[in-house]
Amino acid sequence: MKIDFFKYQGAGNDFVIVDNRQQIFPKDDFDLIERLCDRKFGIGADGFMLLENAKDCDFKMEYFNADGRPGSMCGNGGRCIVAFAKTLNLFEASTSFVALGKKYQATITGELVHLKMMDVDHIEMHKDHVFLDTGSPHHVTFIENLSEFNVVEHGRQIRYGSPYFEKGTNVNFVEKLNENTFSVRTYERGVEDETLSCGTGVTAVALASFHLEKTKEKKVHIKTRGGNLKIEFEEGQKGYKNIILSGPATFVFNGTIDIG
Ligand SMILES: N[C@H](CCC[C@H](N)C(=O)O)C(=O)O
């Protein structure tokens, strides 16, 4: 069977998207999804997404990591699927979609997609890191000389170590550049490698930076290897709310692939 796919990237975090409103895609076939994401045997991507119909929303997003397994929330993927949904005329100026049973809202202005992330109530503070869930789990550590740092080696050690083990976590290494700007590199669970950027990861870094008083700003700029992202948020009674992740989400190419 041949399927049409669309390749997008958001700040260098890249995705294959398939329009599955007709339920044509065999989504239980994790080996197939892994192969489609493979950069040598397939199309190549950090993640795979299906756009499906949803009841009270414009569409549903189903996200899979490059290892073919269903992932948790993906911030850059969310922004990319919103850009894709726009080309299908599924909404005008703003959209709401469902992912992992949660409702998300987004808007588009020019090249930028602004995605409202889930509220974050808990930030775990540890001696040398913080841990929080922004839709996906994130371990955040501040370091120096980020550009020289071996992200894969250290990220992998933390991801597979205590207390995460098999379930794992995404791991972000951060360096402060100025009062409201941070540089971030992320080791992504499910890709098991460094990716060029991670949306839920930079969101976690922005909140962690504010929480640790490394910035007083509630509008934080993040530089990643794949581009720049911006996070705005408000303090809620318990934690953080109205968290908006903004950045580019760009169509790269489309094609047809025989999935057997
Ligand atoms: N790249 C994604 C995160 C994917 C989540 C995945 N790595 C997991 O922990 O299941 C992002 O932009 O937020």
Image: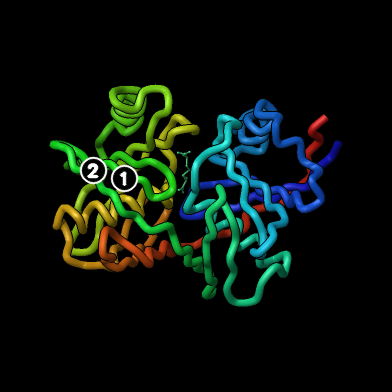
Q: Residue at x 84, y 40 (%)?
A: 2
Mark 2: amino acid: Glu
Q: Which residue is mark 1?
A: 132
Inspect this view and state whether residue 206 appears: yes
Indicate the position of residue 164 as horizontal and vertical percent values. 34, 27
Q: Residue at x 44, y 33 (%)?
A: 189
Q: Residue at x 46, y 54 (%)?
A: 11
Please say if 43 is above or below 219.
above
Mark 1: amino acid: Leu
Inspect this view and state whether residue 146 appears: no
Number of numbered discs on residues: 2
The image quadrant that residue 57 belongs to is: bottom right
Indicate the position of residue 218 as horizontal and vertical percent values. 26, 67
**Which image quarter holds the C terminus?**
top right
Q: Residue at x 62, y 51 (%)?
A: 61
Classify mark 2: residues with Cα within 10 Å, few (<14), some (14-19) or many (20+): few
- Which element type, helix, strand or loop, lies under badge 2? strand
Q: CA distance from mark 1 to mark 2?
A: 6 Å
Please say if 190 is above or below 133.
above
In the depicted view, which residue is nearer to us: 74 or 101? 101
Q: Which mark is residue 37?
A: none
* Contact? badges 1 and 2 (CB < 8 Å): yes
The image quadrant that residue 152 belongs to is: top left
Q: Which residue is mark 2?
A: 124
Classify mark 1: residues with Cα within 10 Å, few (<14), some (14-19) or many (20+): many
